[in-house]
Image (cartoon, rainbow, N blue to C red):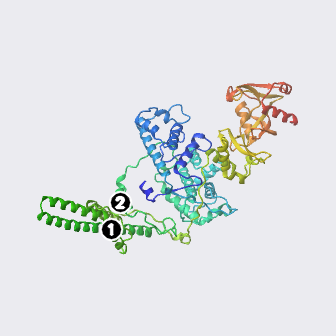
Amino acid sequence: MELFNQGYIKISQYGSIRTVAQYVLESIEKNLNKTSENFIYSAVPVRSDQKYLLDLMKRSLIYSDFSEIDEYISGQNEDLDKLFKCAGKDTCIVDHDNAIEQLKHLRQFIKLTLNVSAKPEFYNPPRKLKQDKDDKDITFRTILDYVIDDMKNTDKDYIEIWTEAIRILKAINNDINPNIMSRTIWHQKLLEQQYNGKVEHYQYAEAIVDLCYNYRQELSVYNVSKHYNTQELKSITVSGDAPTFTADFLRRLKQDWNNGNNADKRYLQHEIDKIDLFHDFKHLPNWKIGMSILKVVRNMKYEEDQLYSYETNNNHQRKERTMKAVKSLFALILVCMLFVLFSTVIEILLGNLQDYLVSNTGLVQTFLMEAFKNLIWVIVFVVLSDEIMKLIEIGLKHLPLVNRLVFLSLDIKEAFQTLFSAIKDIYFIATHRVKQKCIDDEPYKSILNIVEQENIKDKISIPLPIEIKEYMKLYNQKDNELFKGKDLISKEELQNGYVLREYALEHGVKMGMAYKSRYHMMLVDLVKDKQNKPFAYERVINTVTKGSIVVVVKKQNKYILLNQYRHSMGKEQWCFPRGYGEVGIKAVDNVRKEVKEELNADIVGEPKALGQVVADSGLCGTLVDVYFAEIEHYDLKDDYEGIHDIKEVTEEELYNMNINDGFTLAALTLLKKRTII
């Protein structure tokens, strides 16, 4: 907190994220609402699936309230098993002492989060990349795609591990939606597949992913200089050539990988809710001395007209800071010495005056003289001290060694303590050596002093609810057919989602992605009527928008119907097999998959497309593909997905049955319109 207060640590705002508390709360919402990918916490004693603990964090942050956590820590609430329970597990037995320790650290984290969130001076404004009209945003996936597809590693010591890691990443890249920017999903995929080959290849692949993510984060940070020309990143999607970026990436990757040292502890780690506390304080510099020096050099200003690239000129800058600190300490010593000298002279003079008066007067006069002496002290040290110190300060400012003075309270003991402390601090600075590794700047001479200060000048936008953020993320996906309706408000009117927020507040409704599950999502759009008046309209979309199917299954001359329980109706109905779309599976492949799962049957020949249907166009917005397929045999998988019976019926029986399933009736209509050969 002291480093924050003095401005030595700053927090970078990002996008619409204003504070640390907002960032943590939005991350909690991702895990509680499941409207987005999981958020994996680092250095925080909580897992993404510990819903009760996350909800406790949420309440503590929203209400600035530690009472609930304190009840658990003090033992007033003993239900720790439930608090630490992971979603999907029936029970969770925790070690009581460890759980209390974790809660103490969590409390400390929340307290720090609230403290730093309350002070706007702790924050740097977000950096906005300047974009031309034709420029595309540089994303985590943009950088990763370049590394996977175009970057070449010529270091002979790393060719084998690099080649294998890139092969692994290419395979994973094909399975992940290009619009997903989360690093977590890459970690999860690598963790799942690590046993398919050498573990170090997957560890190295994770190091590559992490570095790509770090580069993207650095691009968003206010006034961070680089060791590469960032203009290259804007053209890599076209030219696939970025020589200075490639050189810097490979250098940093080699440094991060560090020959695989501690790779087993750094990579392919399962999510945990433990914190490894630091105990090796004897190898740290003296914190008290550091704080003392910081107070002396408080508010030291540096030239900001030129930003150096990382370690460039680092030794010169370190020496410059050290000299400023030493000068300030010398100024402090000089002030202390002058104060001690001044105080001593005054003490001697007043002491001599007192001795003279006592030796020449009676008891009453002695008392009066003592009071007179104290009055003189008050006048000298209370009234005149500030003026005397100002005169000393003005005089010392003209000395070449001094660039700053520190005001002291006029106390002899404190002056001596400060004097010896300053001498000790100078000794520490003179004898302390920092182990540092600076890179060879020779390859980067042409770009060393590139100054990048492309920053936002206007205020950061108001935070959006997570359901509107997720809606806008879906809305901005390339070639998204979900938002082609002519009644939707225009992209210009949408204003990145803020008009949805305003409408929700004014009308008391939830806008955006109101709900999302594995199978469905409910979108609440803002549309316009004929009078151009906006109103909310909800619709249900399949989470995987393509590949949903209904299959008209025929065995010899009879059709196959399933008797399947439907929760929404609370009873069974006769219907054809059908299934939701799945990521990476085409509709025709999904036909084979569903028939195999529900009938344990293999399709003979190729399924034939009959057309597309929508279940309820007033609410549902997903087109479902209808297919015809023939099989030779099947088996009843009793109670699989609510299936209780299978019936073979002729065409005449089929049309005479009391069928009320919309998809089945629609499939029958399409079947009747076509002649199946």
Q: Give me the C-alpha separation between circle 1 and circle 2.
A: 22 Å
- Identify the residue at horizontal 77%, vertical 41% (top origin): 623
Foreground pick, 628 / 218: 218
Q: Quadrant of residue 368?
A: bottom left
* Badge 1 amino acid: Met
The answer to whether one can see residue 178 in this image is no
Crowdedness of circle 2 by 10 Å Cα count: few (<14), some, many (20+)? some
Residue 348 vs residue 423: left or right?
A: left
Crowding near pointer 1: few (<14 within 10 Å), some, many (20+)? some
Q: Could you tell which of marks 1 and 2 lies nearer the N-terminus? A: 2
- Horizontal side of residue 141 vs 562, given as left or right: left
Q: Is residue 472 above or below residue 223?
A: above
Secondary structure at numbered mark 2: helix
Disc 1 element? helix
Q: Nearer the viewer, mark 1 or mark 2?
A: 1
**Residue at (73%, 30%) from the top-left corner?**
599
Q: Position of residue 357 (x, y in %)?
A: 15, 65
- Residue that numbered label 2 is attached to: 292
Three-letter amino acid code at disc 2?
Answer: Ser
Measured as percent of width and height from the top left, residue 269 is found at 51, 46
Position above or below: 473 against 127: above
Q: Is residue 600 left or right of residue 116?
A: right
Q: Which mark is residue 389?
A: 1
Instruction: State whether residue 283 appears in this view.
Output: yes
The x and y percentages for residue 307 are: 52, 67
